[in-house]
Structures are given as C-alpha cells and as structure tokens.
Amino acid sequence: MYLPWFPCVDCARAIVQAGITELIAFRPNLRDERWGPDFVVGLQMLEEAGVAVRFVDERALADEES
C-alpha cells in the first residue's frame, strides 16, 4: 500500500485488519507534537503484525524531480 503520509493508530489498525502486507510511505516525524506519539504506536502495531514498512525520503524525491 502506498500512502502520501504515515498512518495514525486507527489507520494502522485498519491496515493490519485488511491483511495488507507492505506499506510504503514518507518517514513520519516521530517528534511531532500532535501526531508523533500516534505514529510511534502505529509503527509498533504494524511491525508486530508483520507488515513490512518502507520509507521514502521526501527530500531525496524532491531532489530527483528538480
């Protein structure tokens, strides 16, 4: 599954329940005041469920497009 952002806890739960086995998204800011804690728990849930998580580096992608 390709996502333009990292999933919150509720979305991570839905991804696991749907049986999705791989997730590709931009790397989340785990220090974000609002979403950081949610991203940490979501990532842990995905890893525990065996969902392969791959990160795309936004800056590297922007450099390629320039």
Image (tube, grey):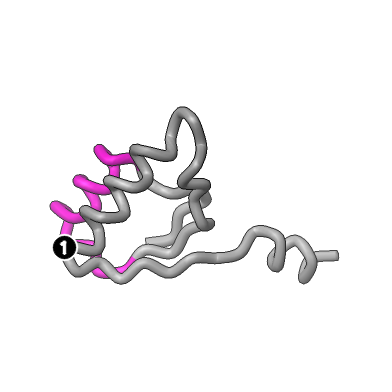
Q: Quadrant of residue 43?
A: bottom left
- Residue shown at 27% from the left, 48% from the top: 12
Foreground residue among 27 and 62: 27
Magenta residues?
Answer: 8-22
Crowding at dot 1, Cα within 10 Å, few <14 / some 14-19 / many 20+, comes out as some
Q: For the residue labelled by badge 1, is the local secondary structure a helix, a strand or a loop?
A: loop
The residue to which callout 1 is attached is 49
Image coords of residue 28 (percent x, y)? 49, 50
Foreground residue among 57 and 4: 57
- In the picture, measured across the screen, residue 27 lies left or right of residue 49, that is right
- Residue shown at 24% from the left, 63% from the top: 47
Q: Relative to 65, is 4 above or below?
A: above
Name the residue at the top extreme: 34
The magenta stretch spans residue 10: yes
Q: Amino acid at mark 1?
A: Ala
- Residue shown at 16% from the left, 62% from the top: 49
Image coords of residue 25 (percent x, y)? 47, 58
Look at the image and tell me in which quarter the N terminus lies. bottom left
Q: Quadrant of residue 54?
A: bottom left
Look at the image and tell me in which quarter the C terminus lies. bottom right
- Residue shown at 18% from the left, 55% from the top: 16
Image coords of residue 52 (percent x, y)? 30, 71
- In the picture, measured across the screen, residue 48 lies left or right of residue 38, that is left
- In the picture, measured across the screen, residue 37 lies left or right of residue 33, that is left
Name the main secondary structure of what is drawn in magenta: helix
Q: Relative to 55, is 40 above or below?
A: above
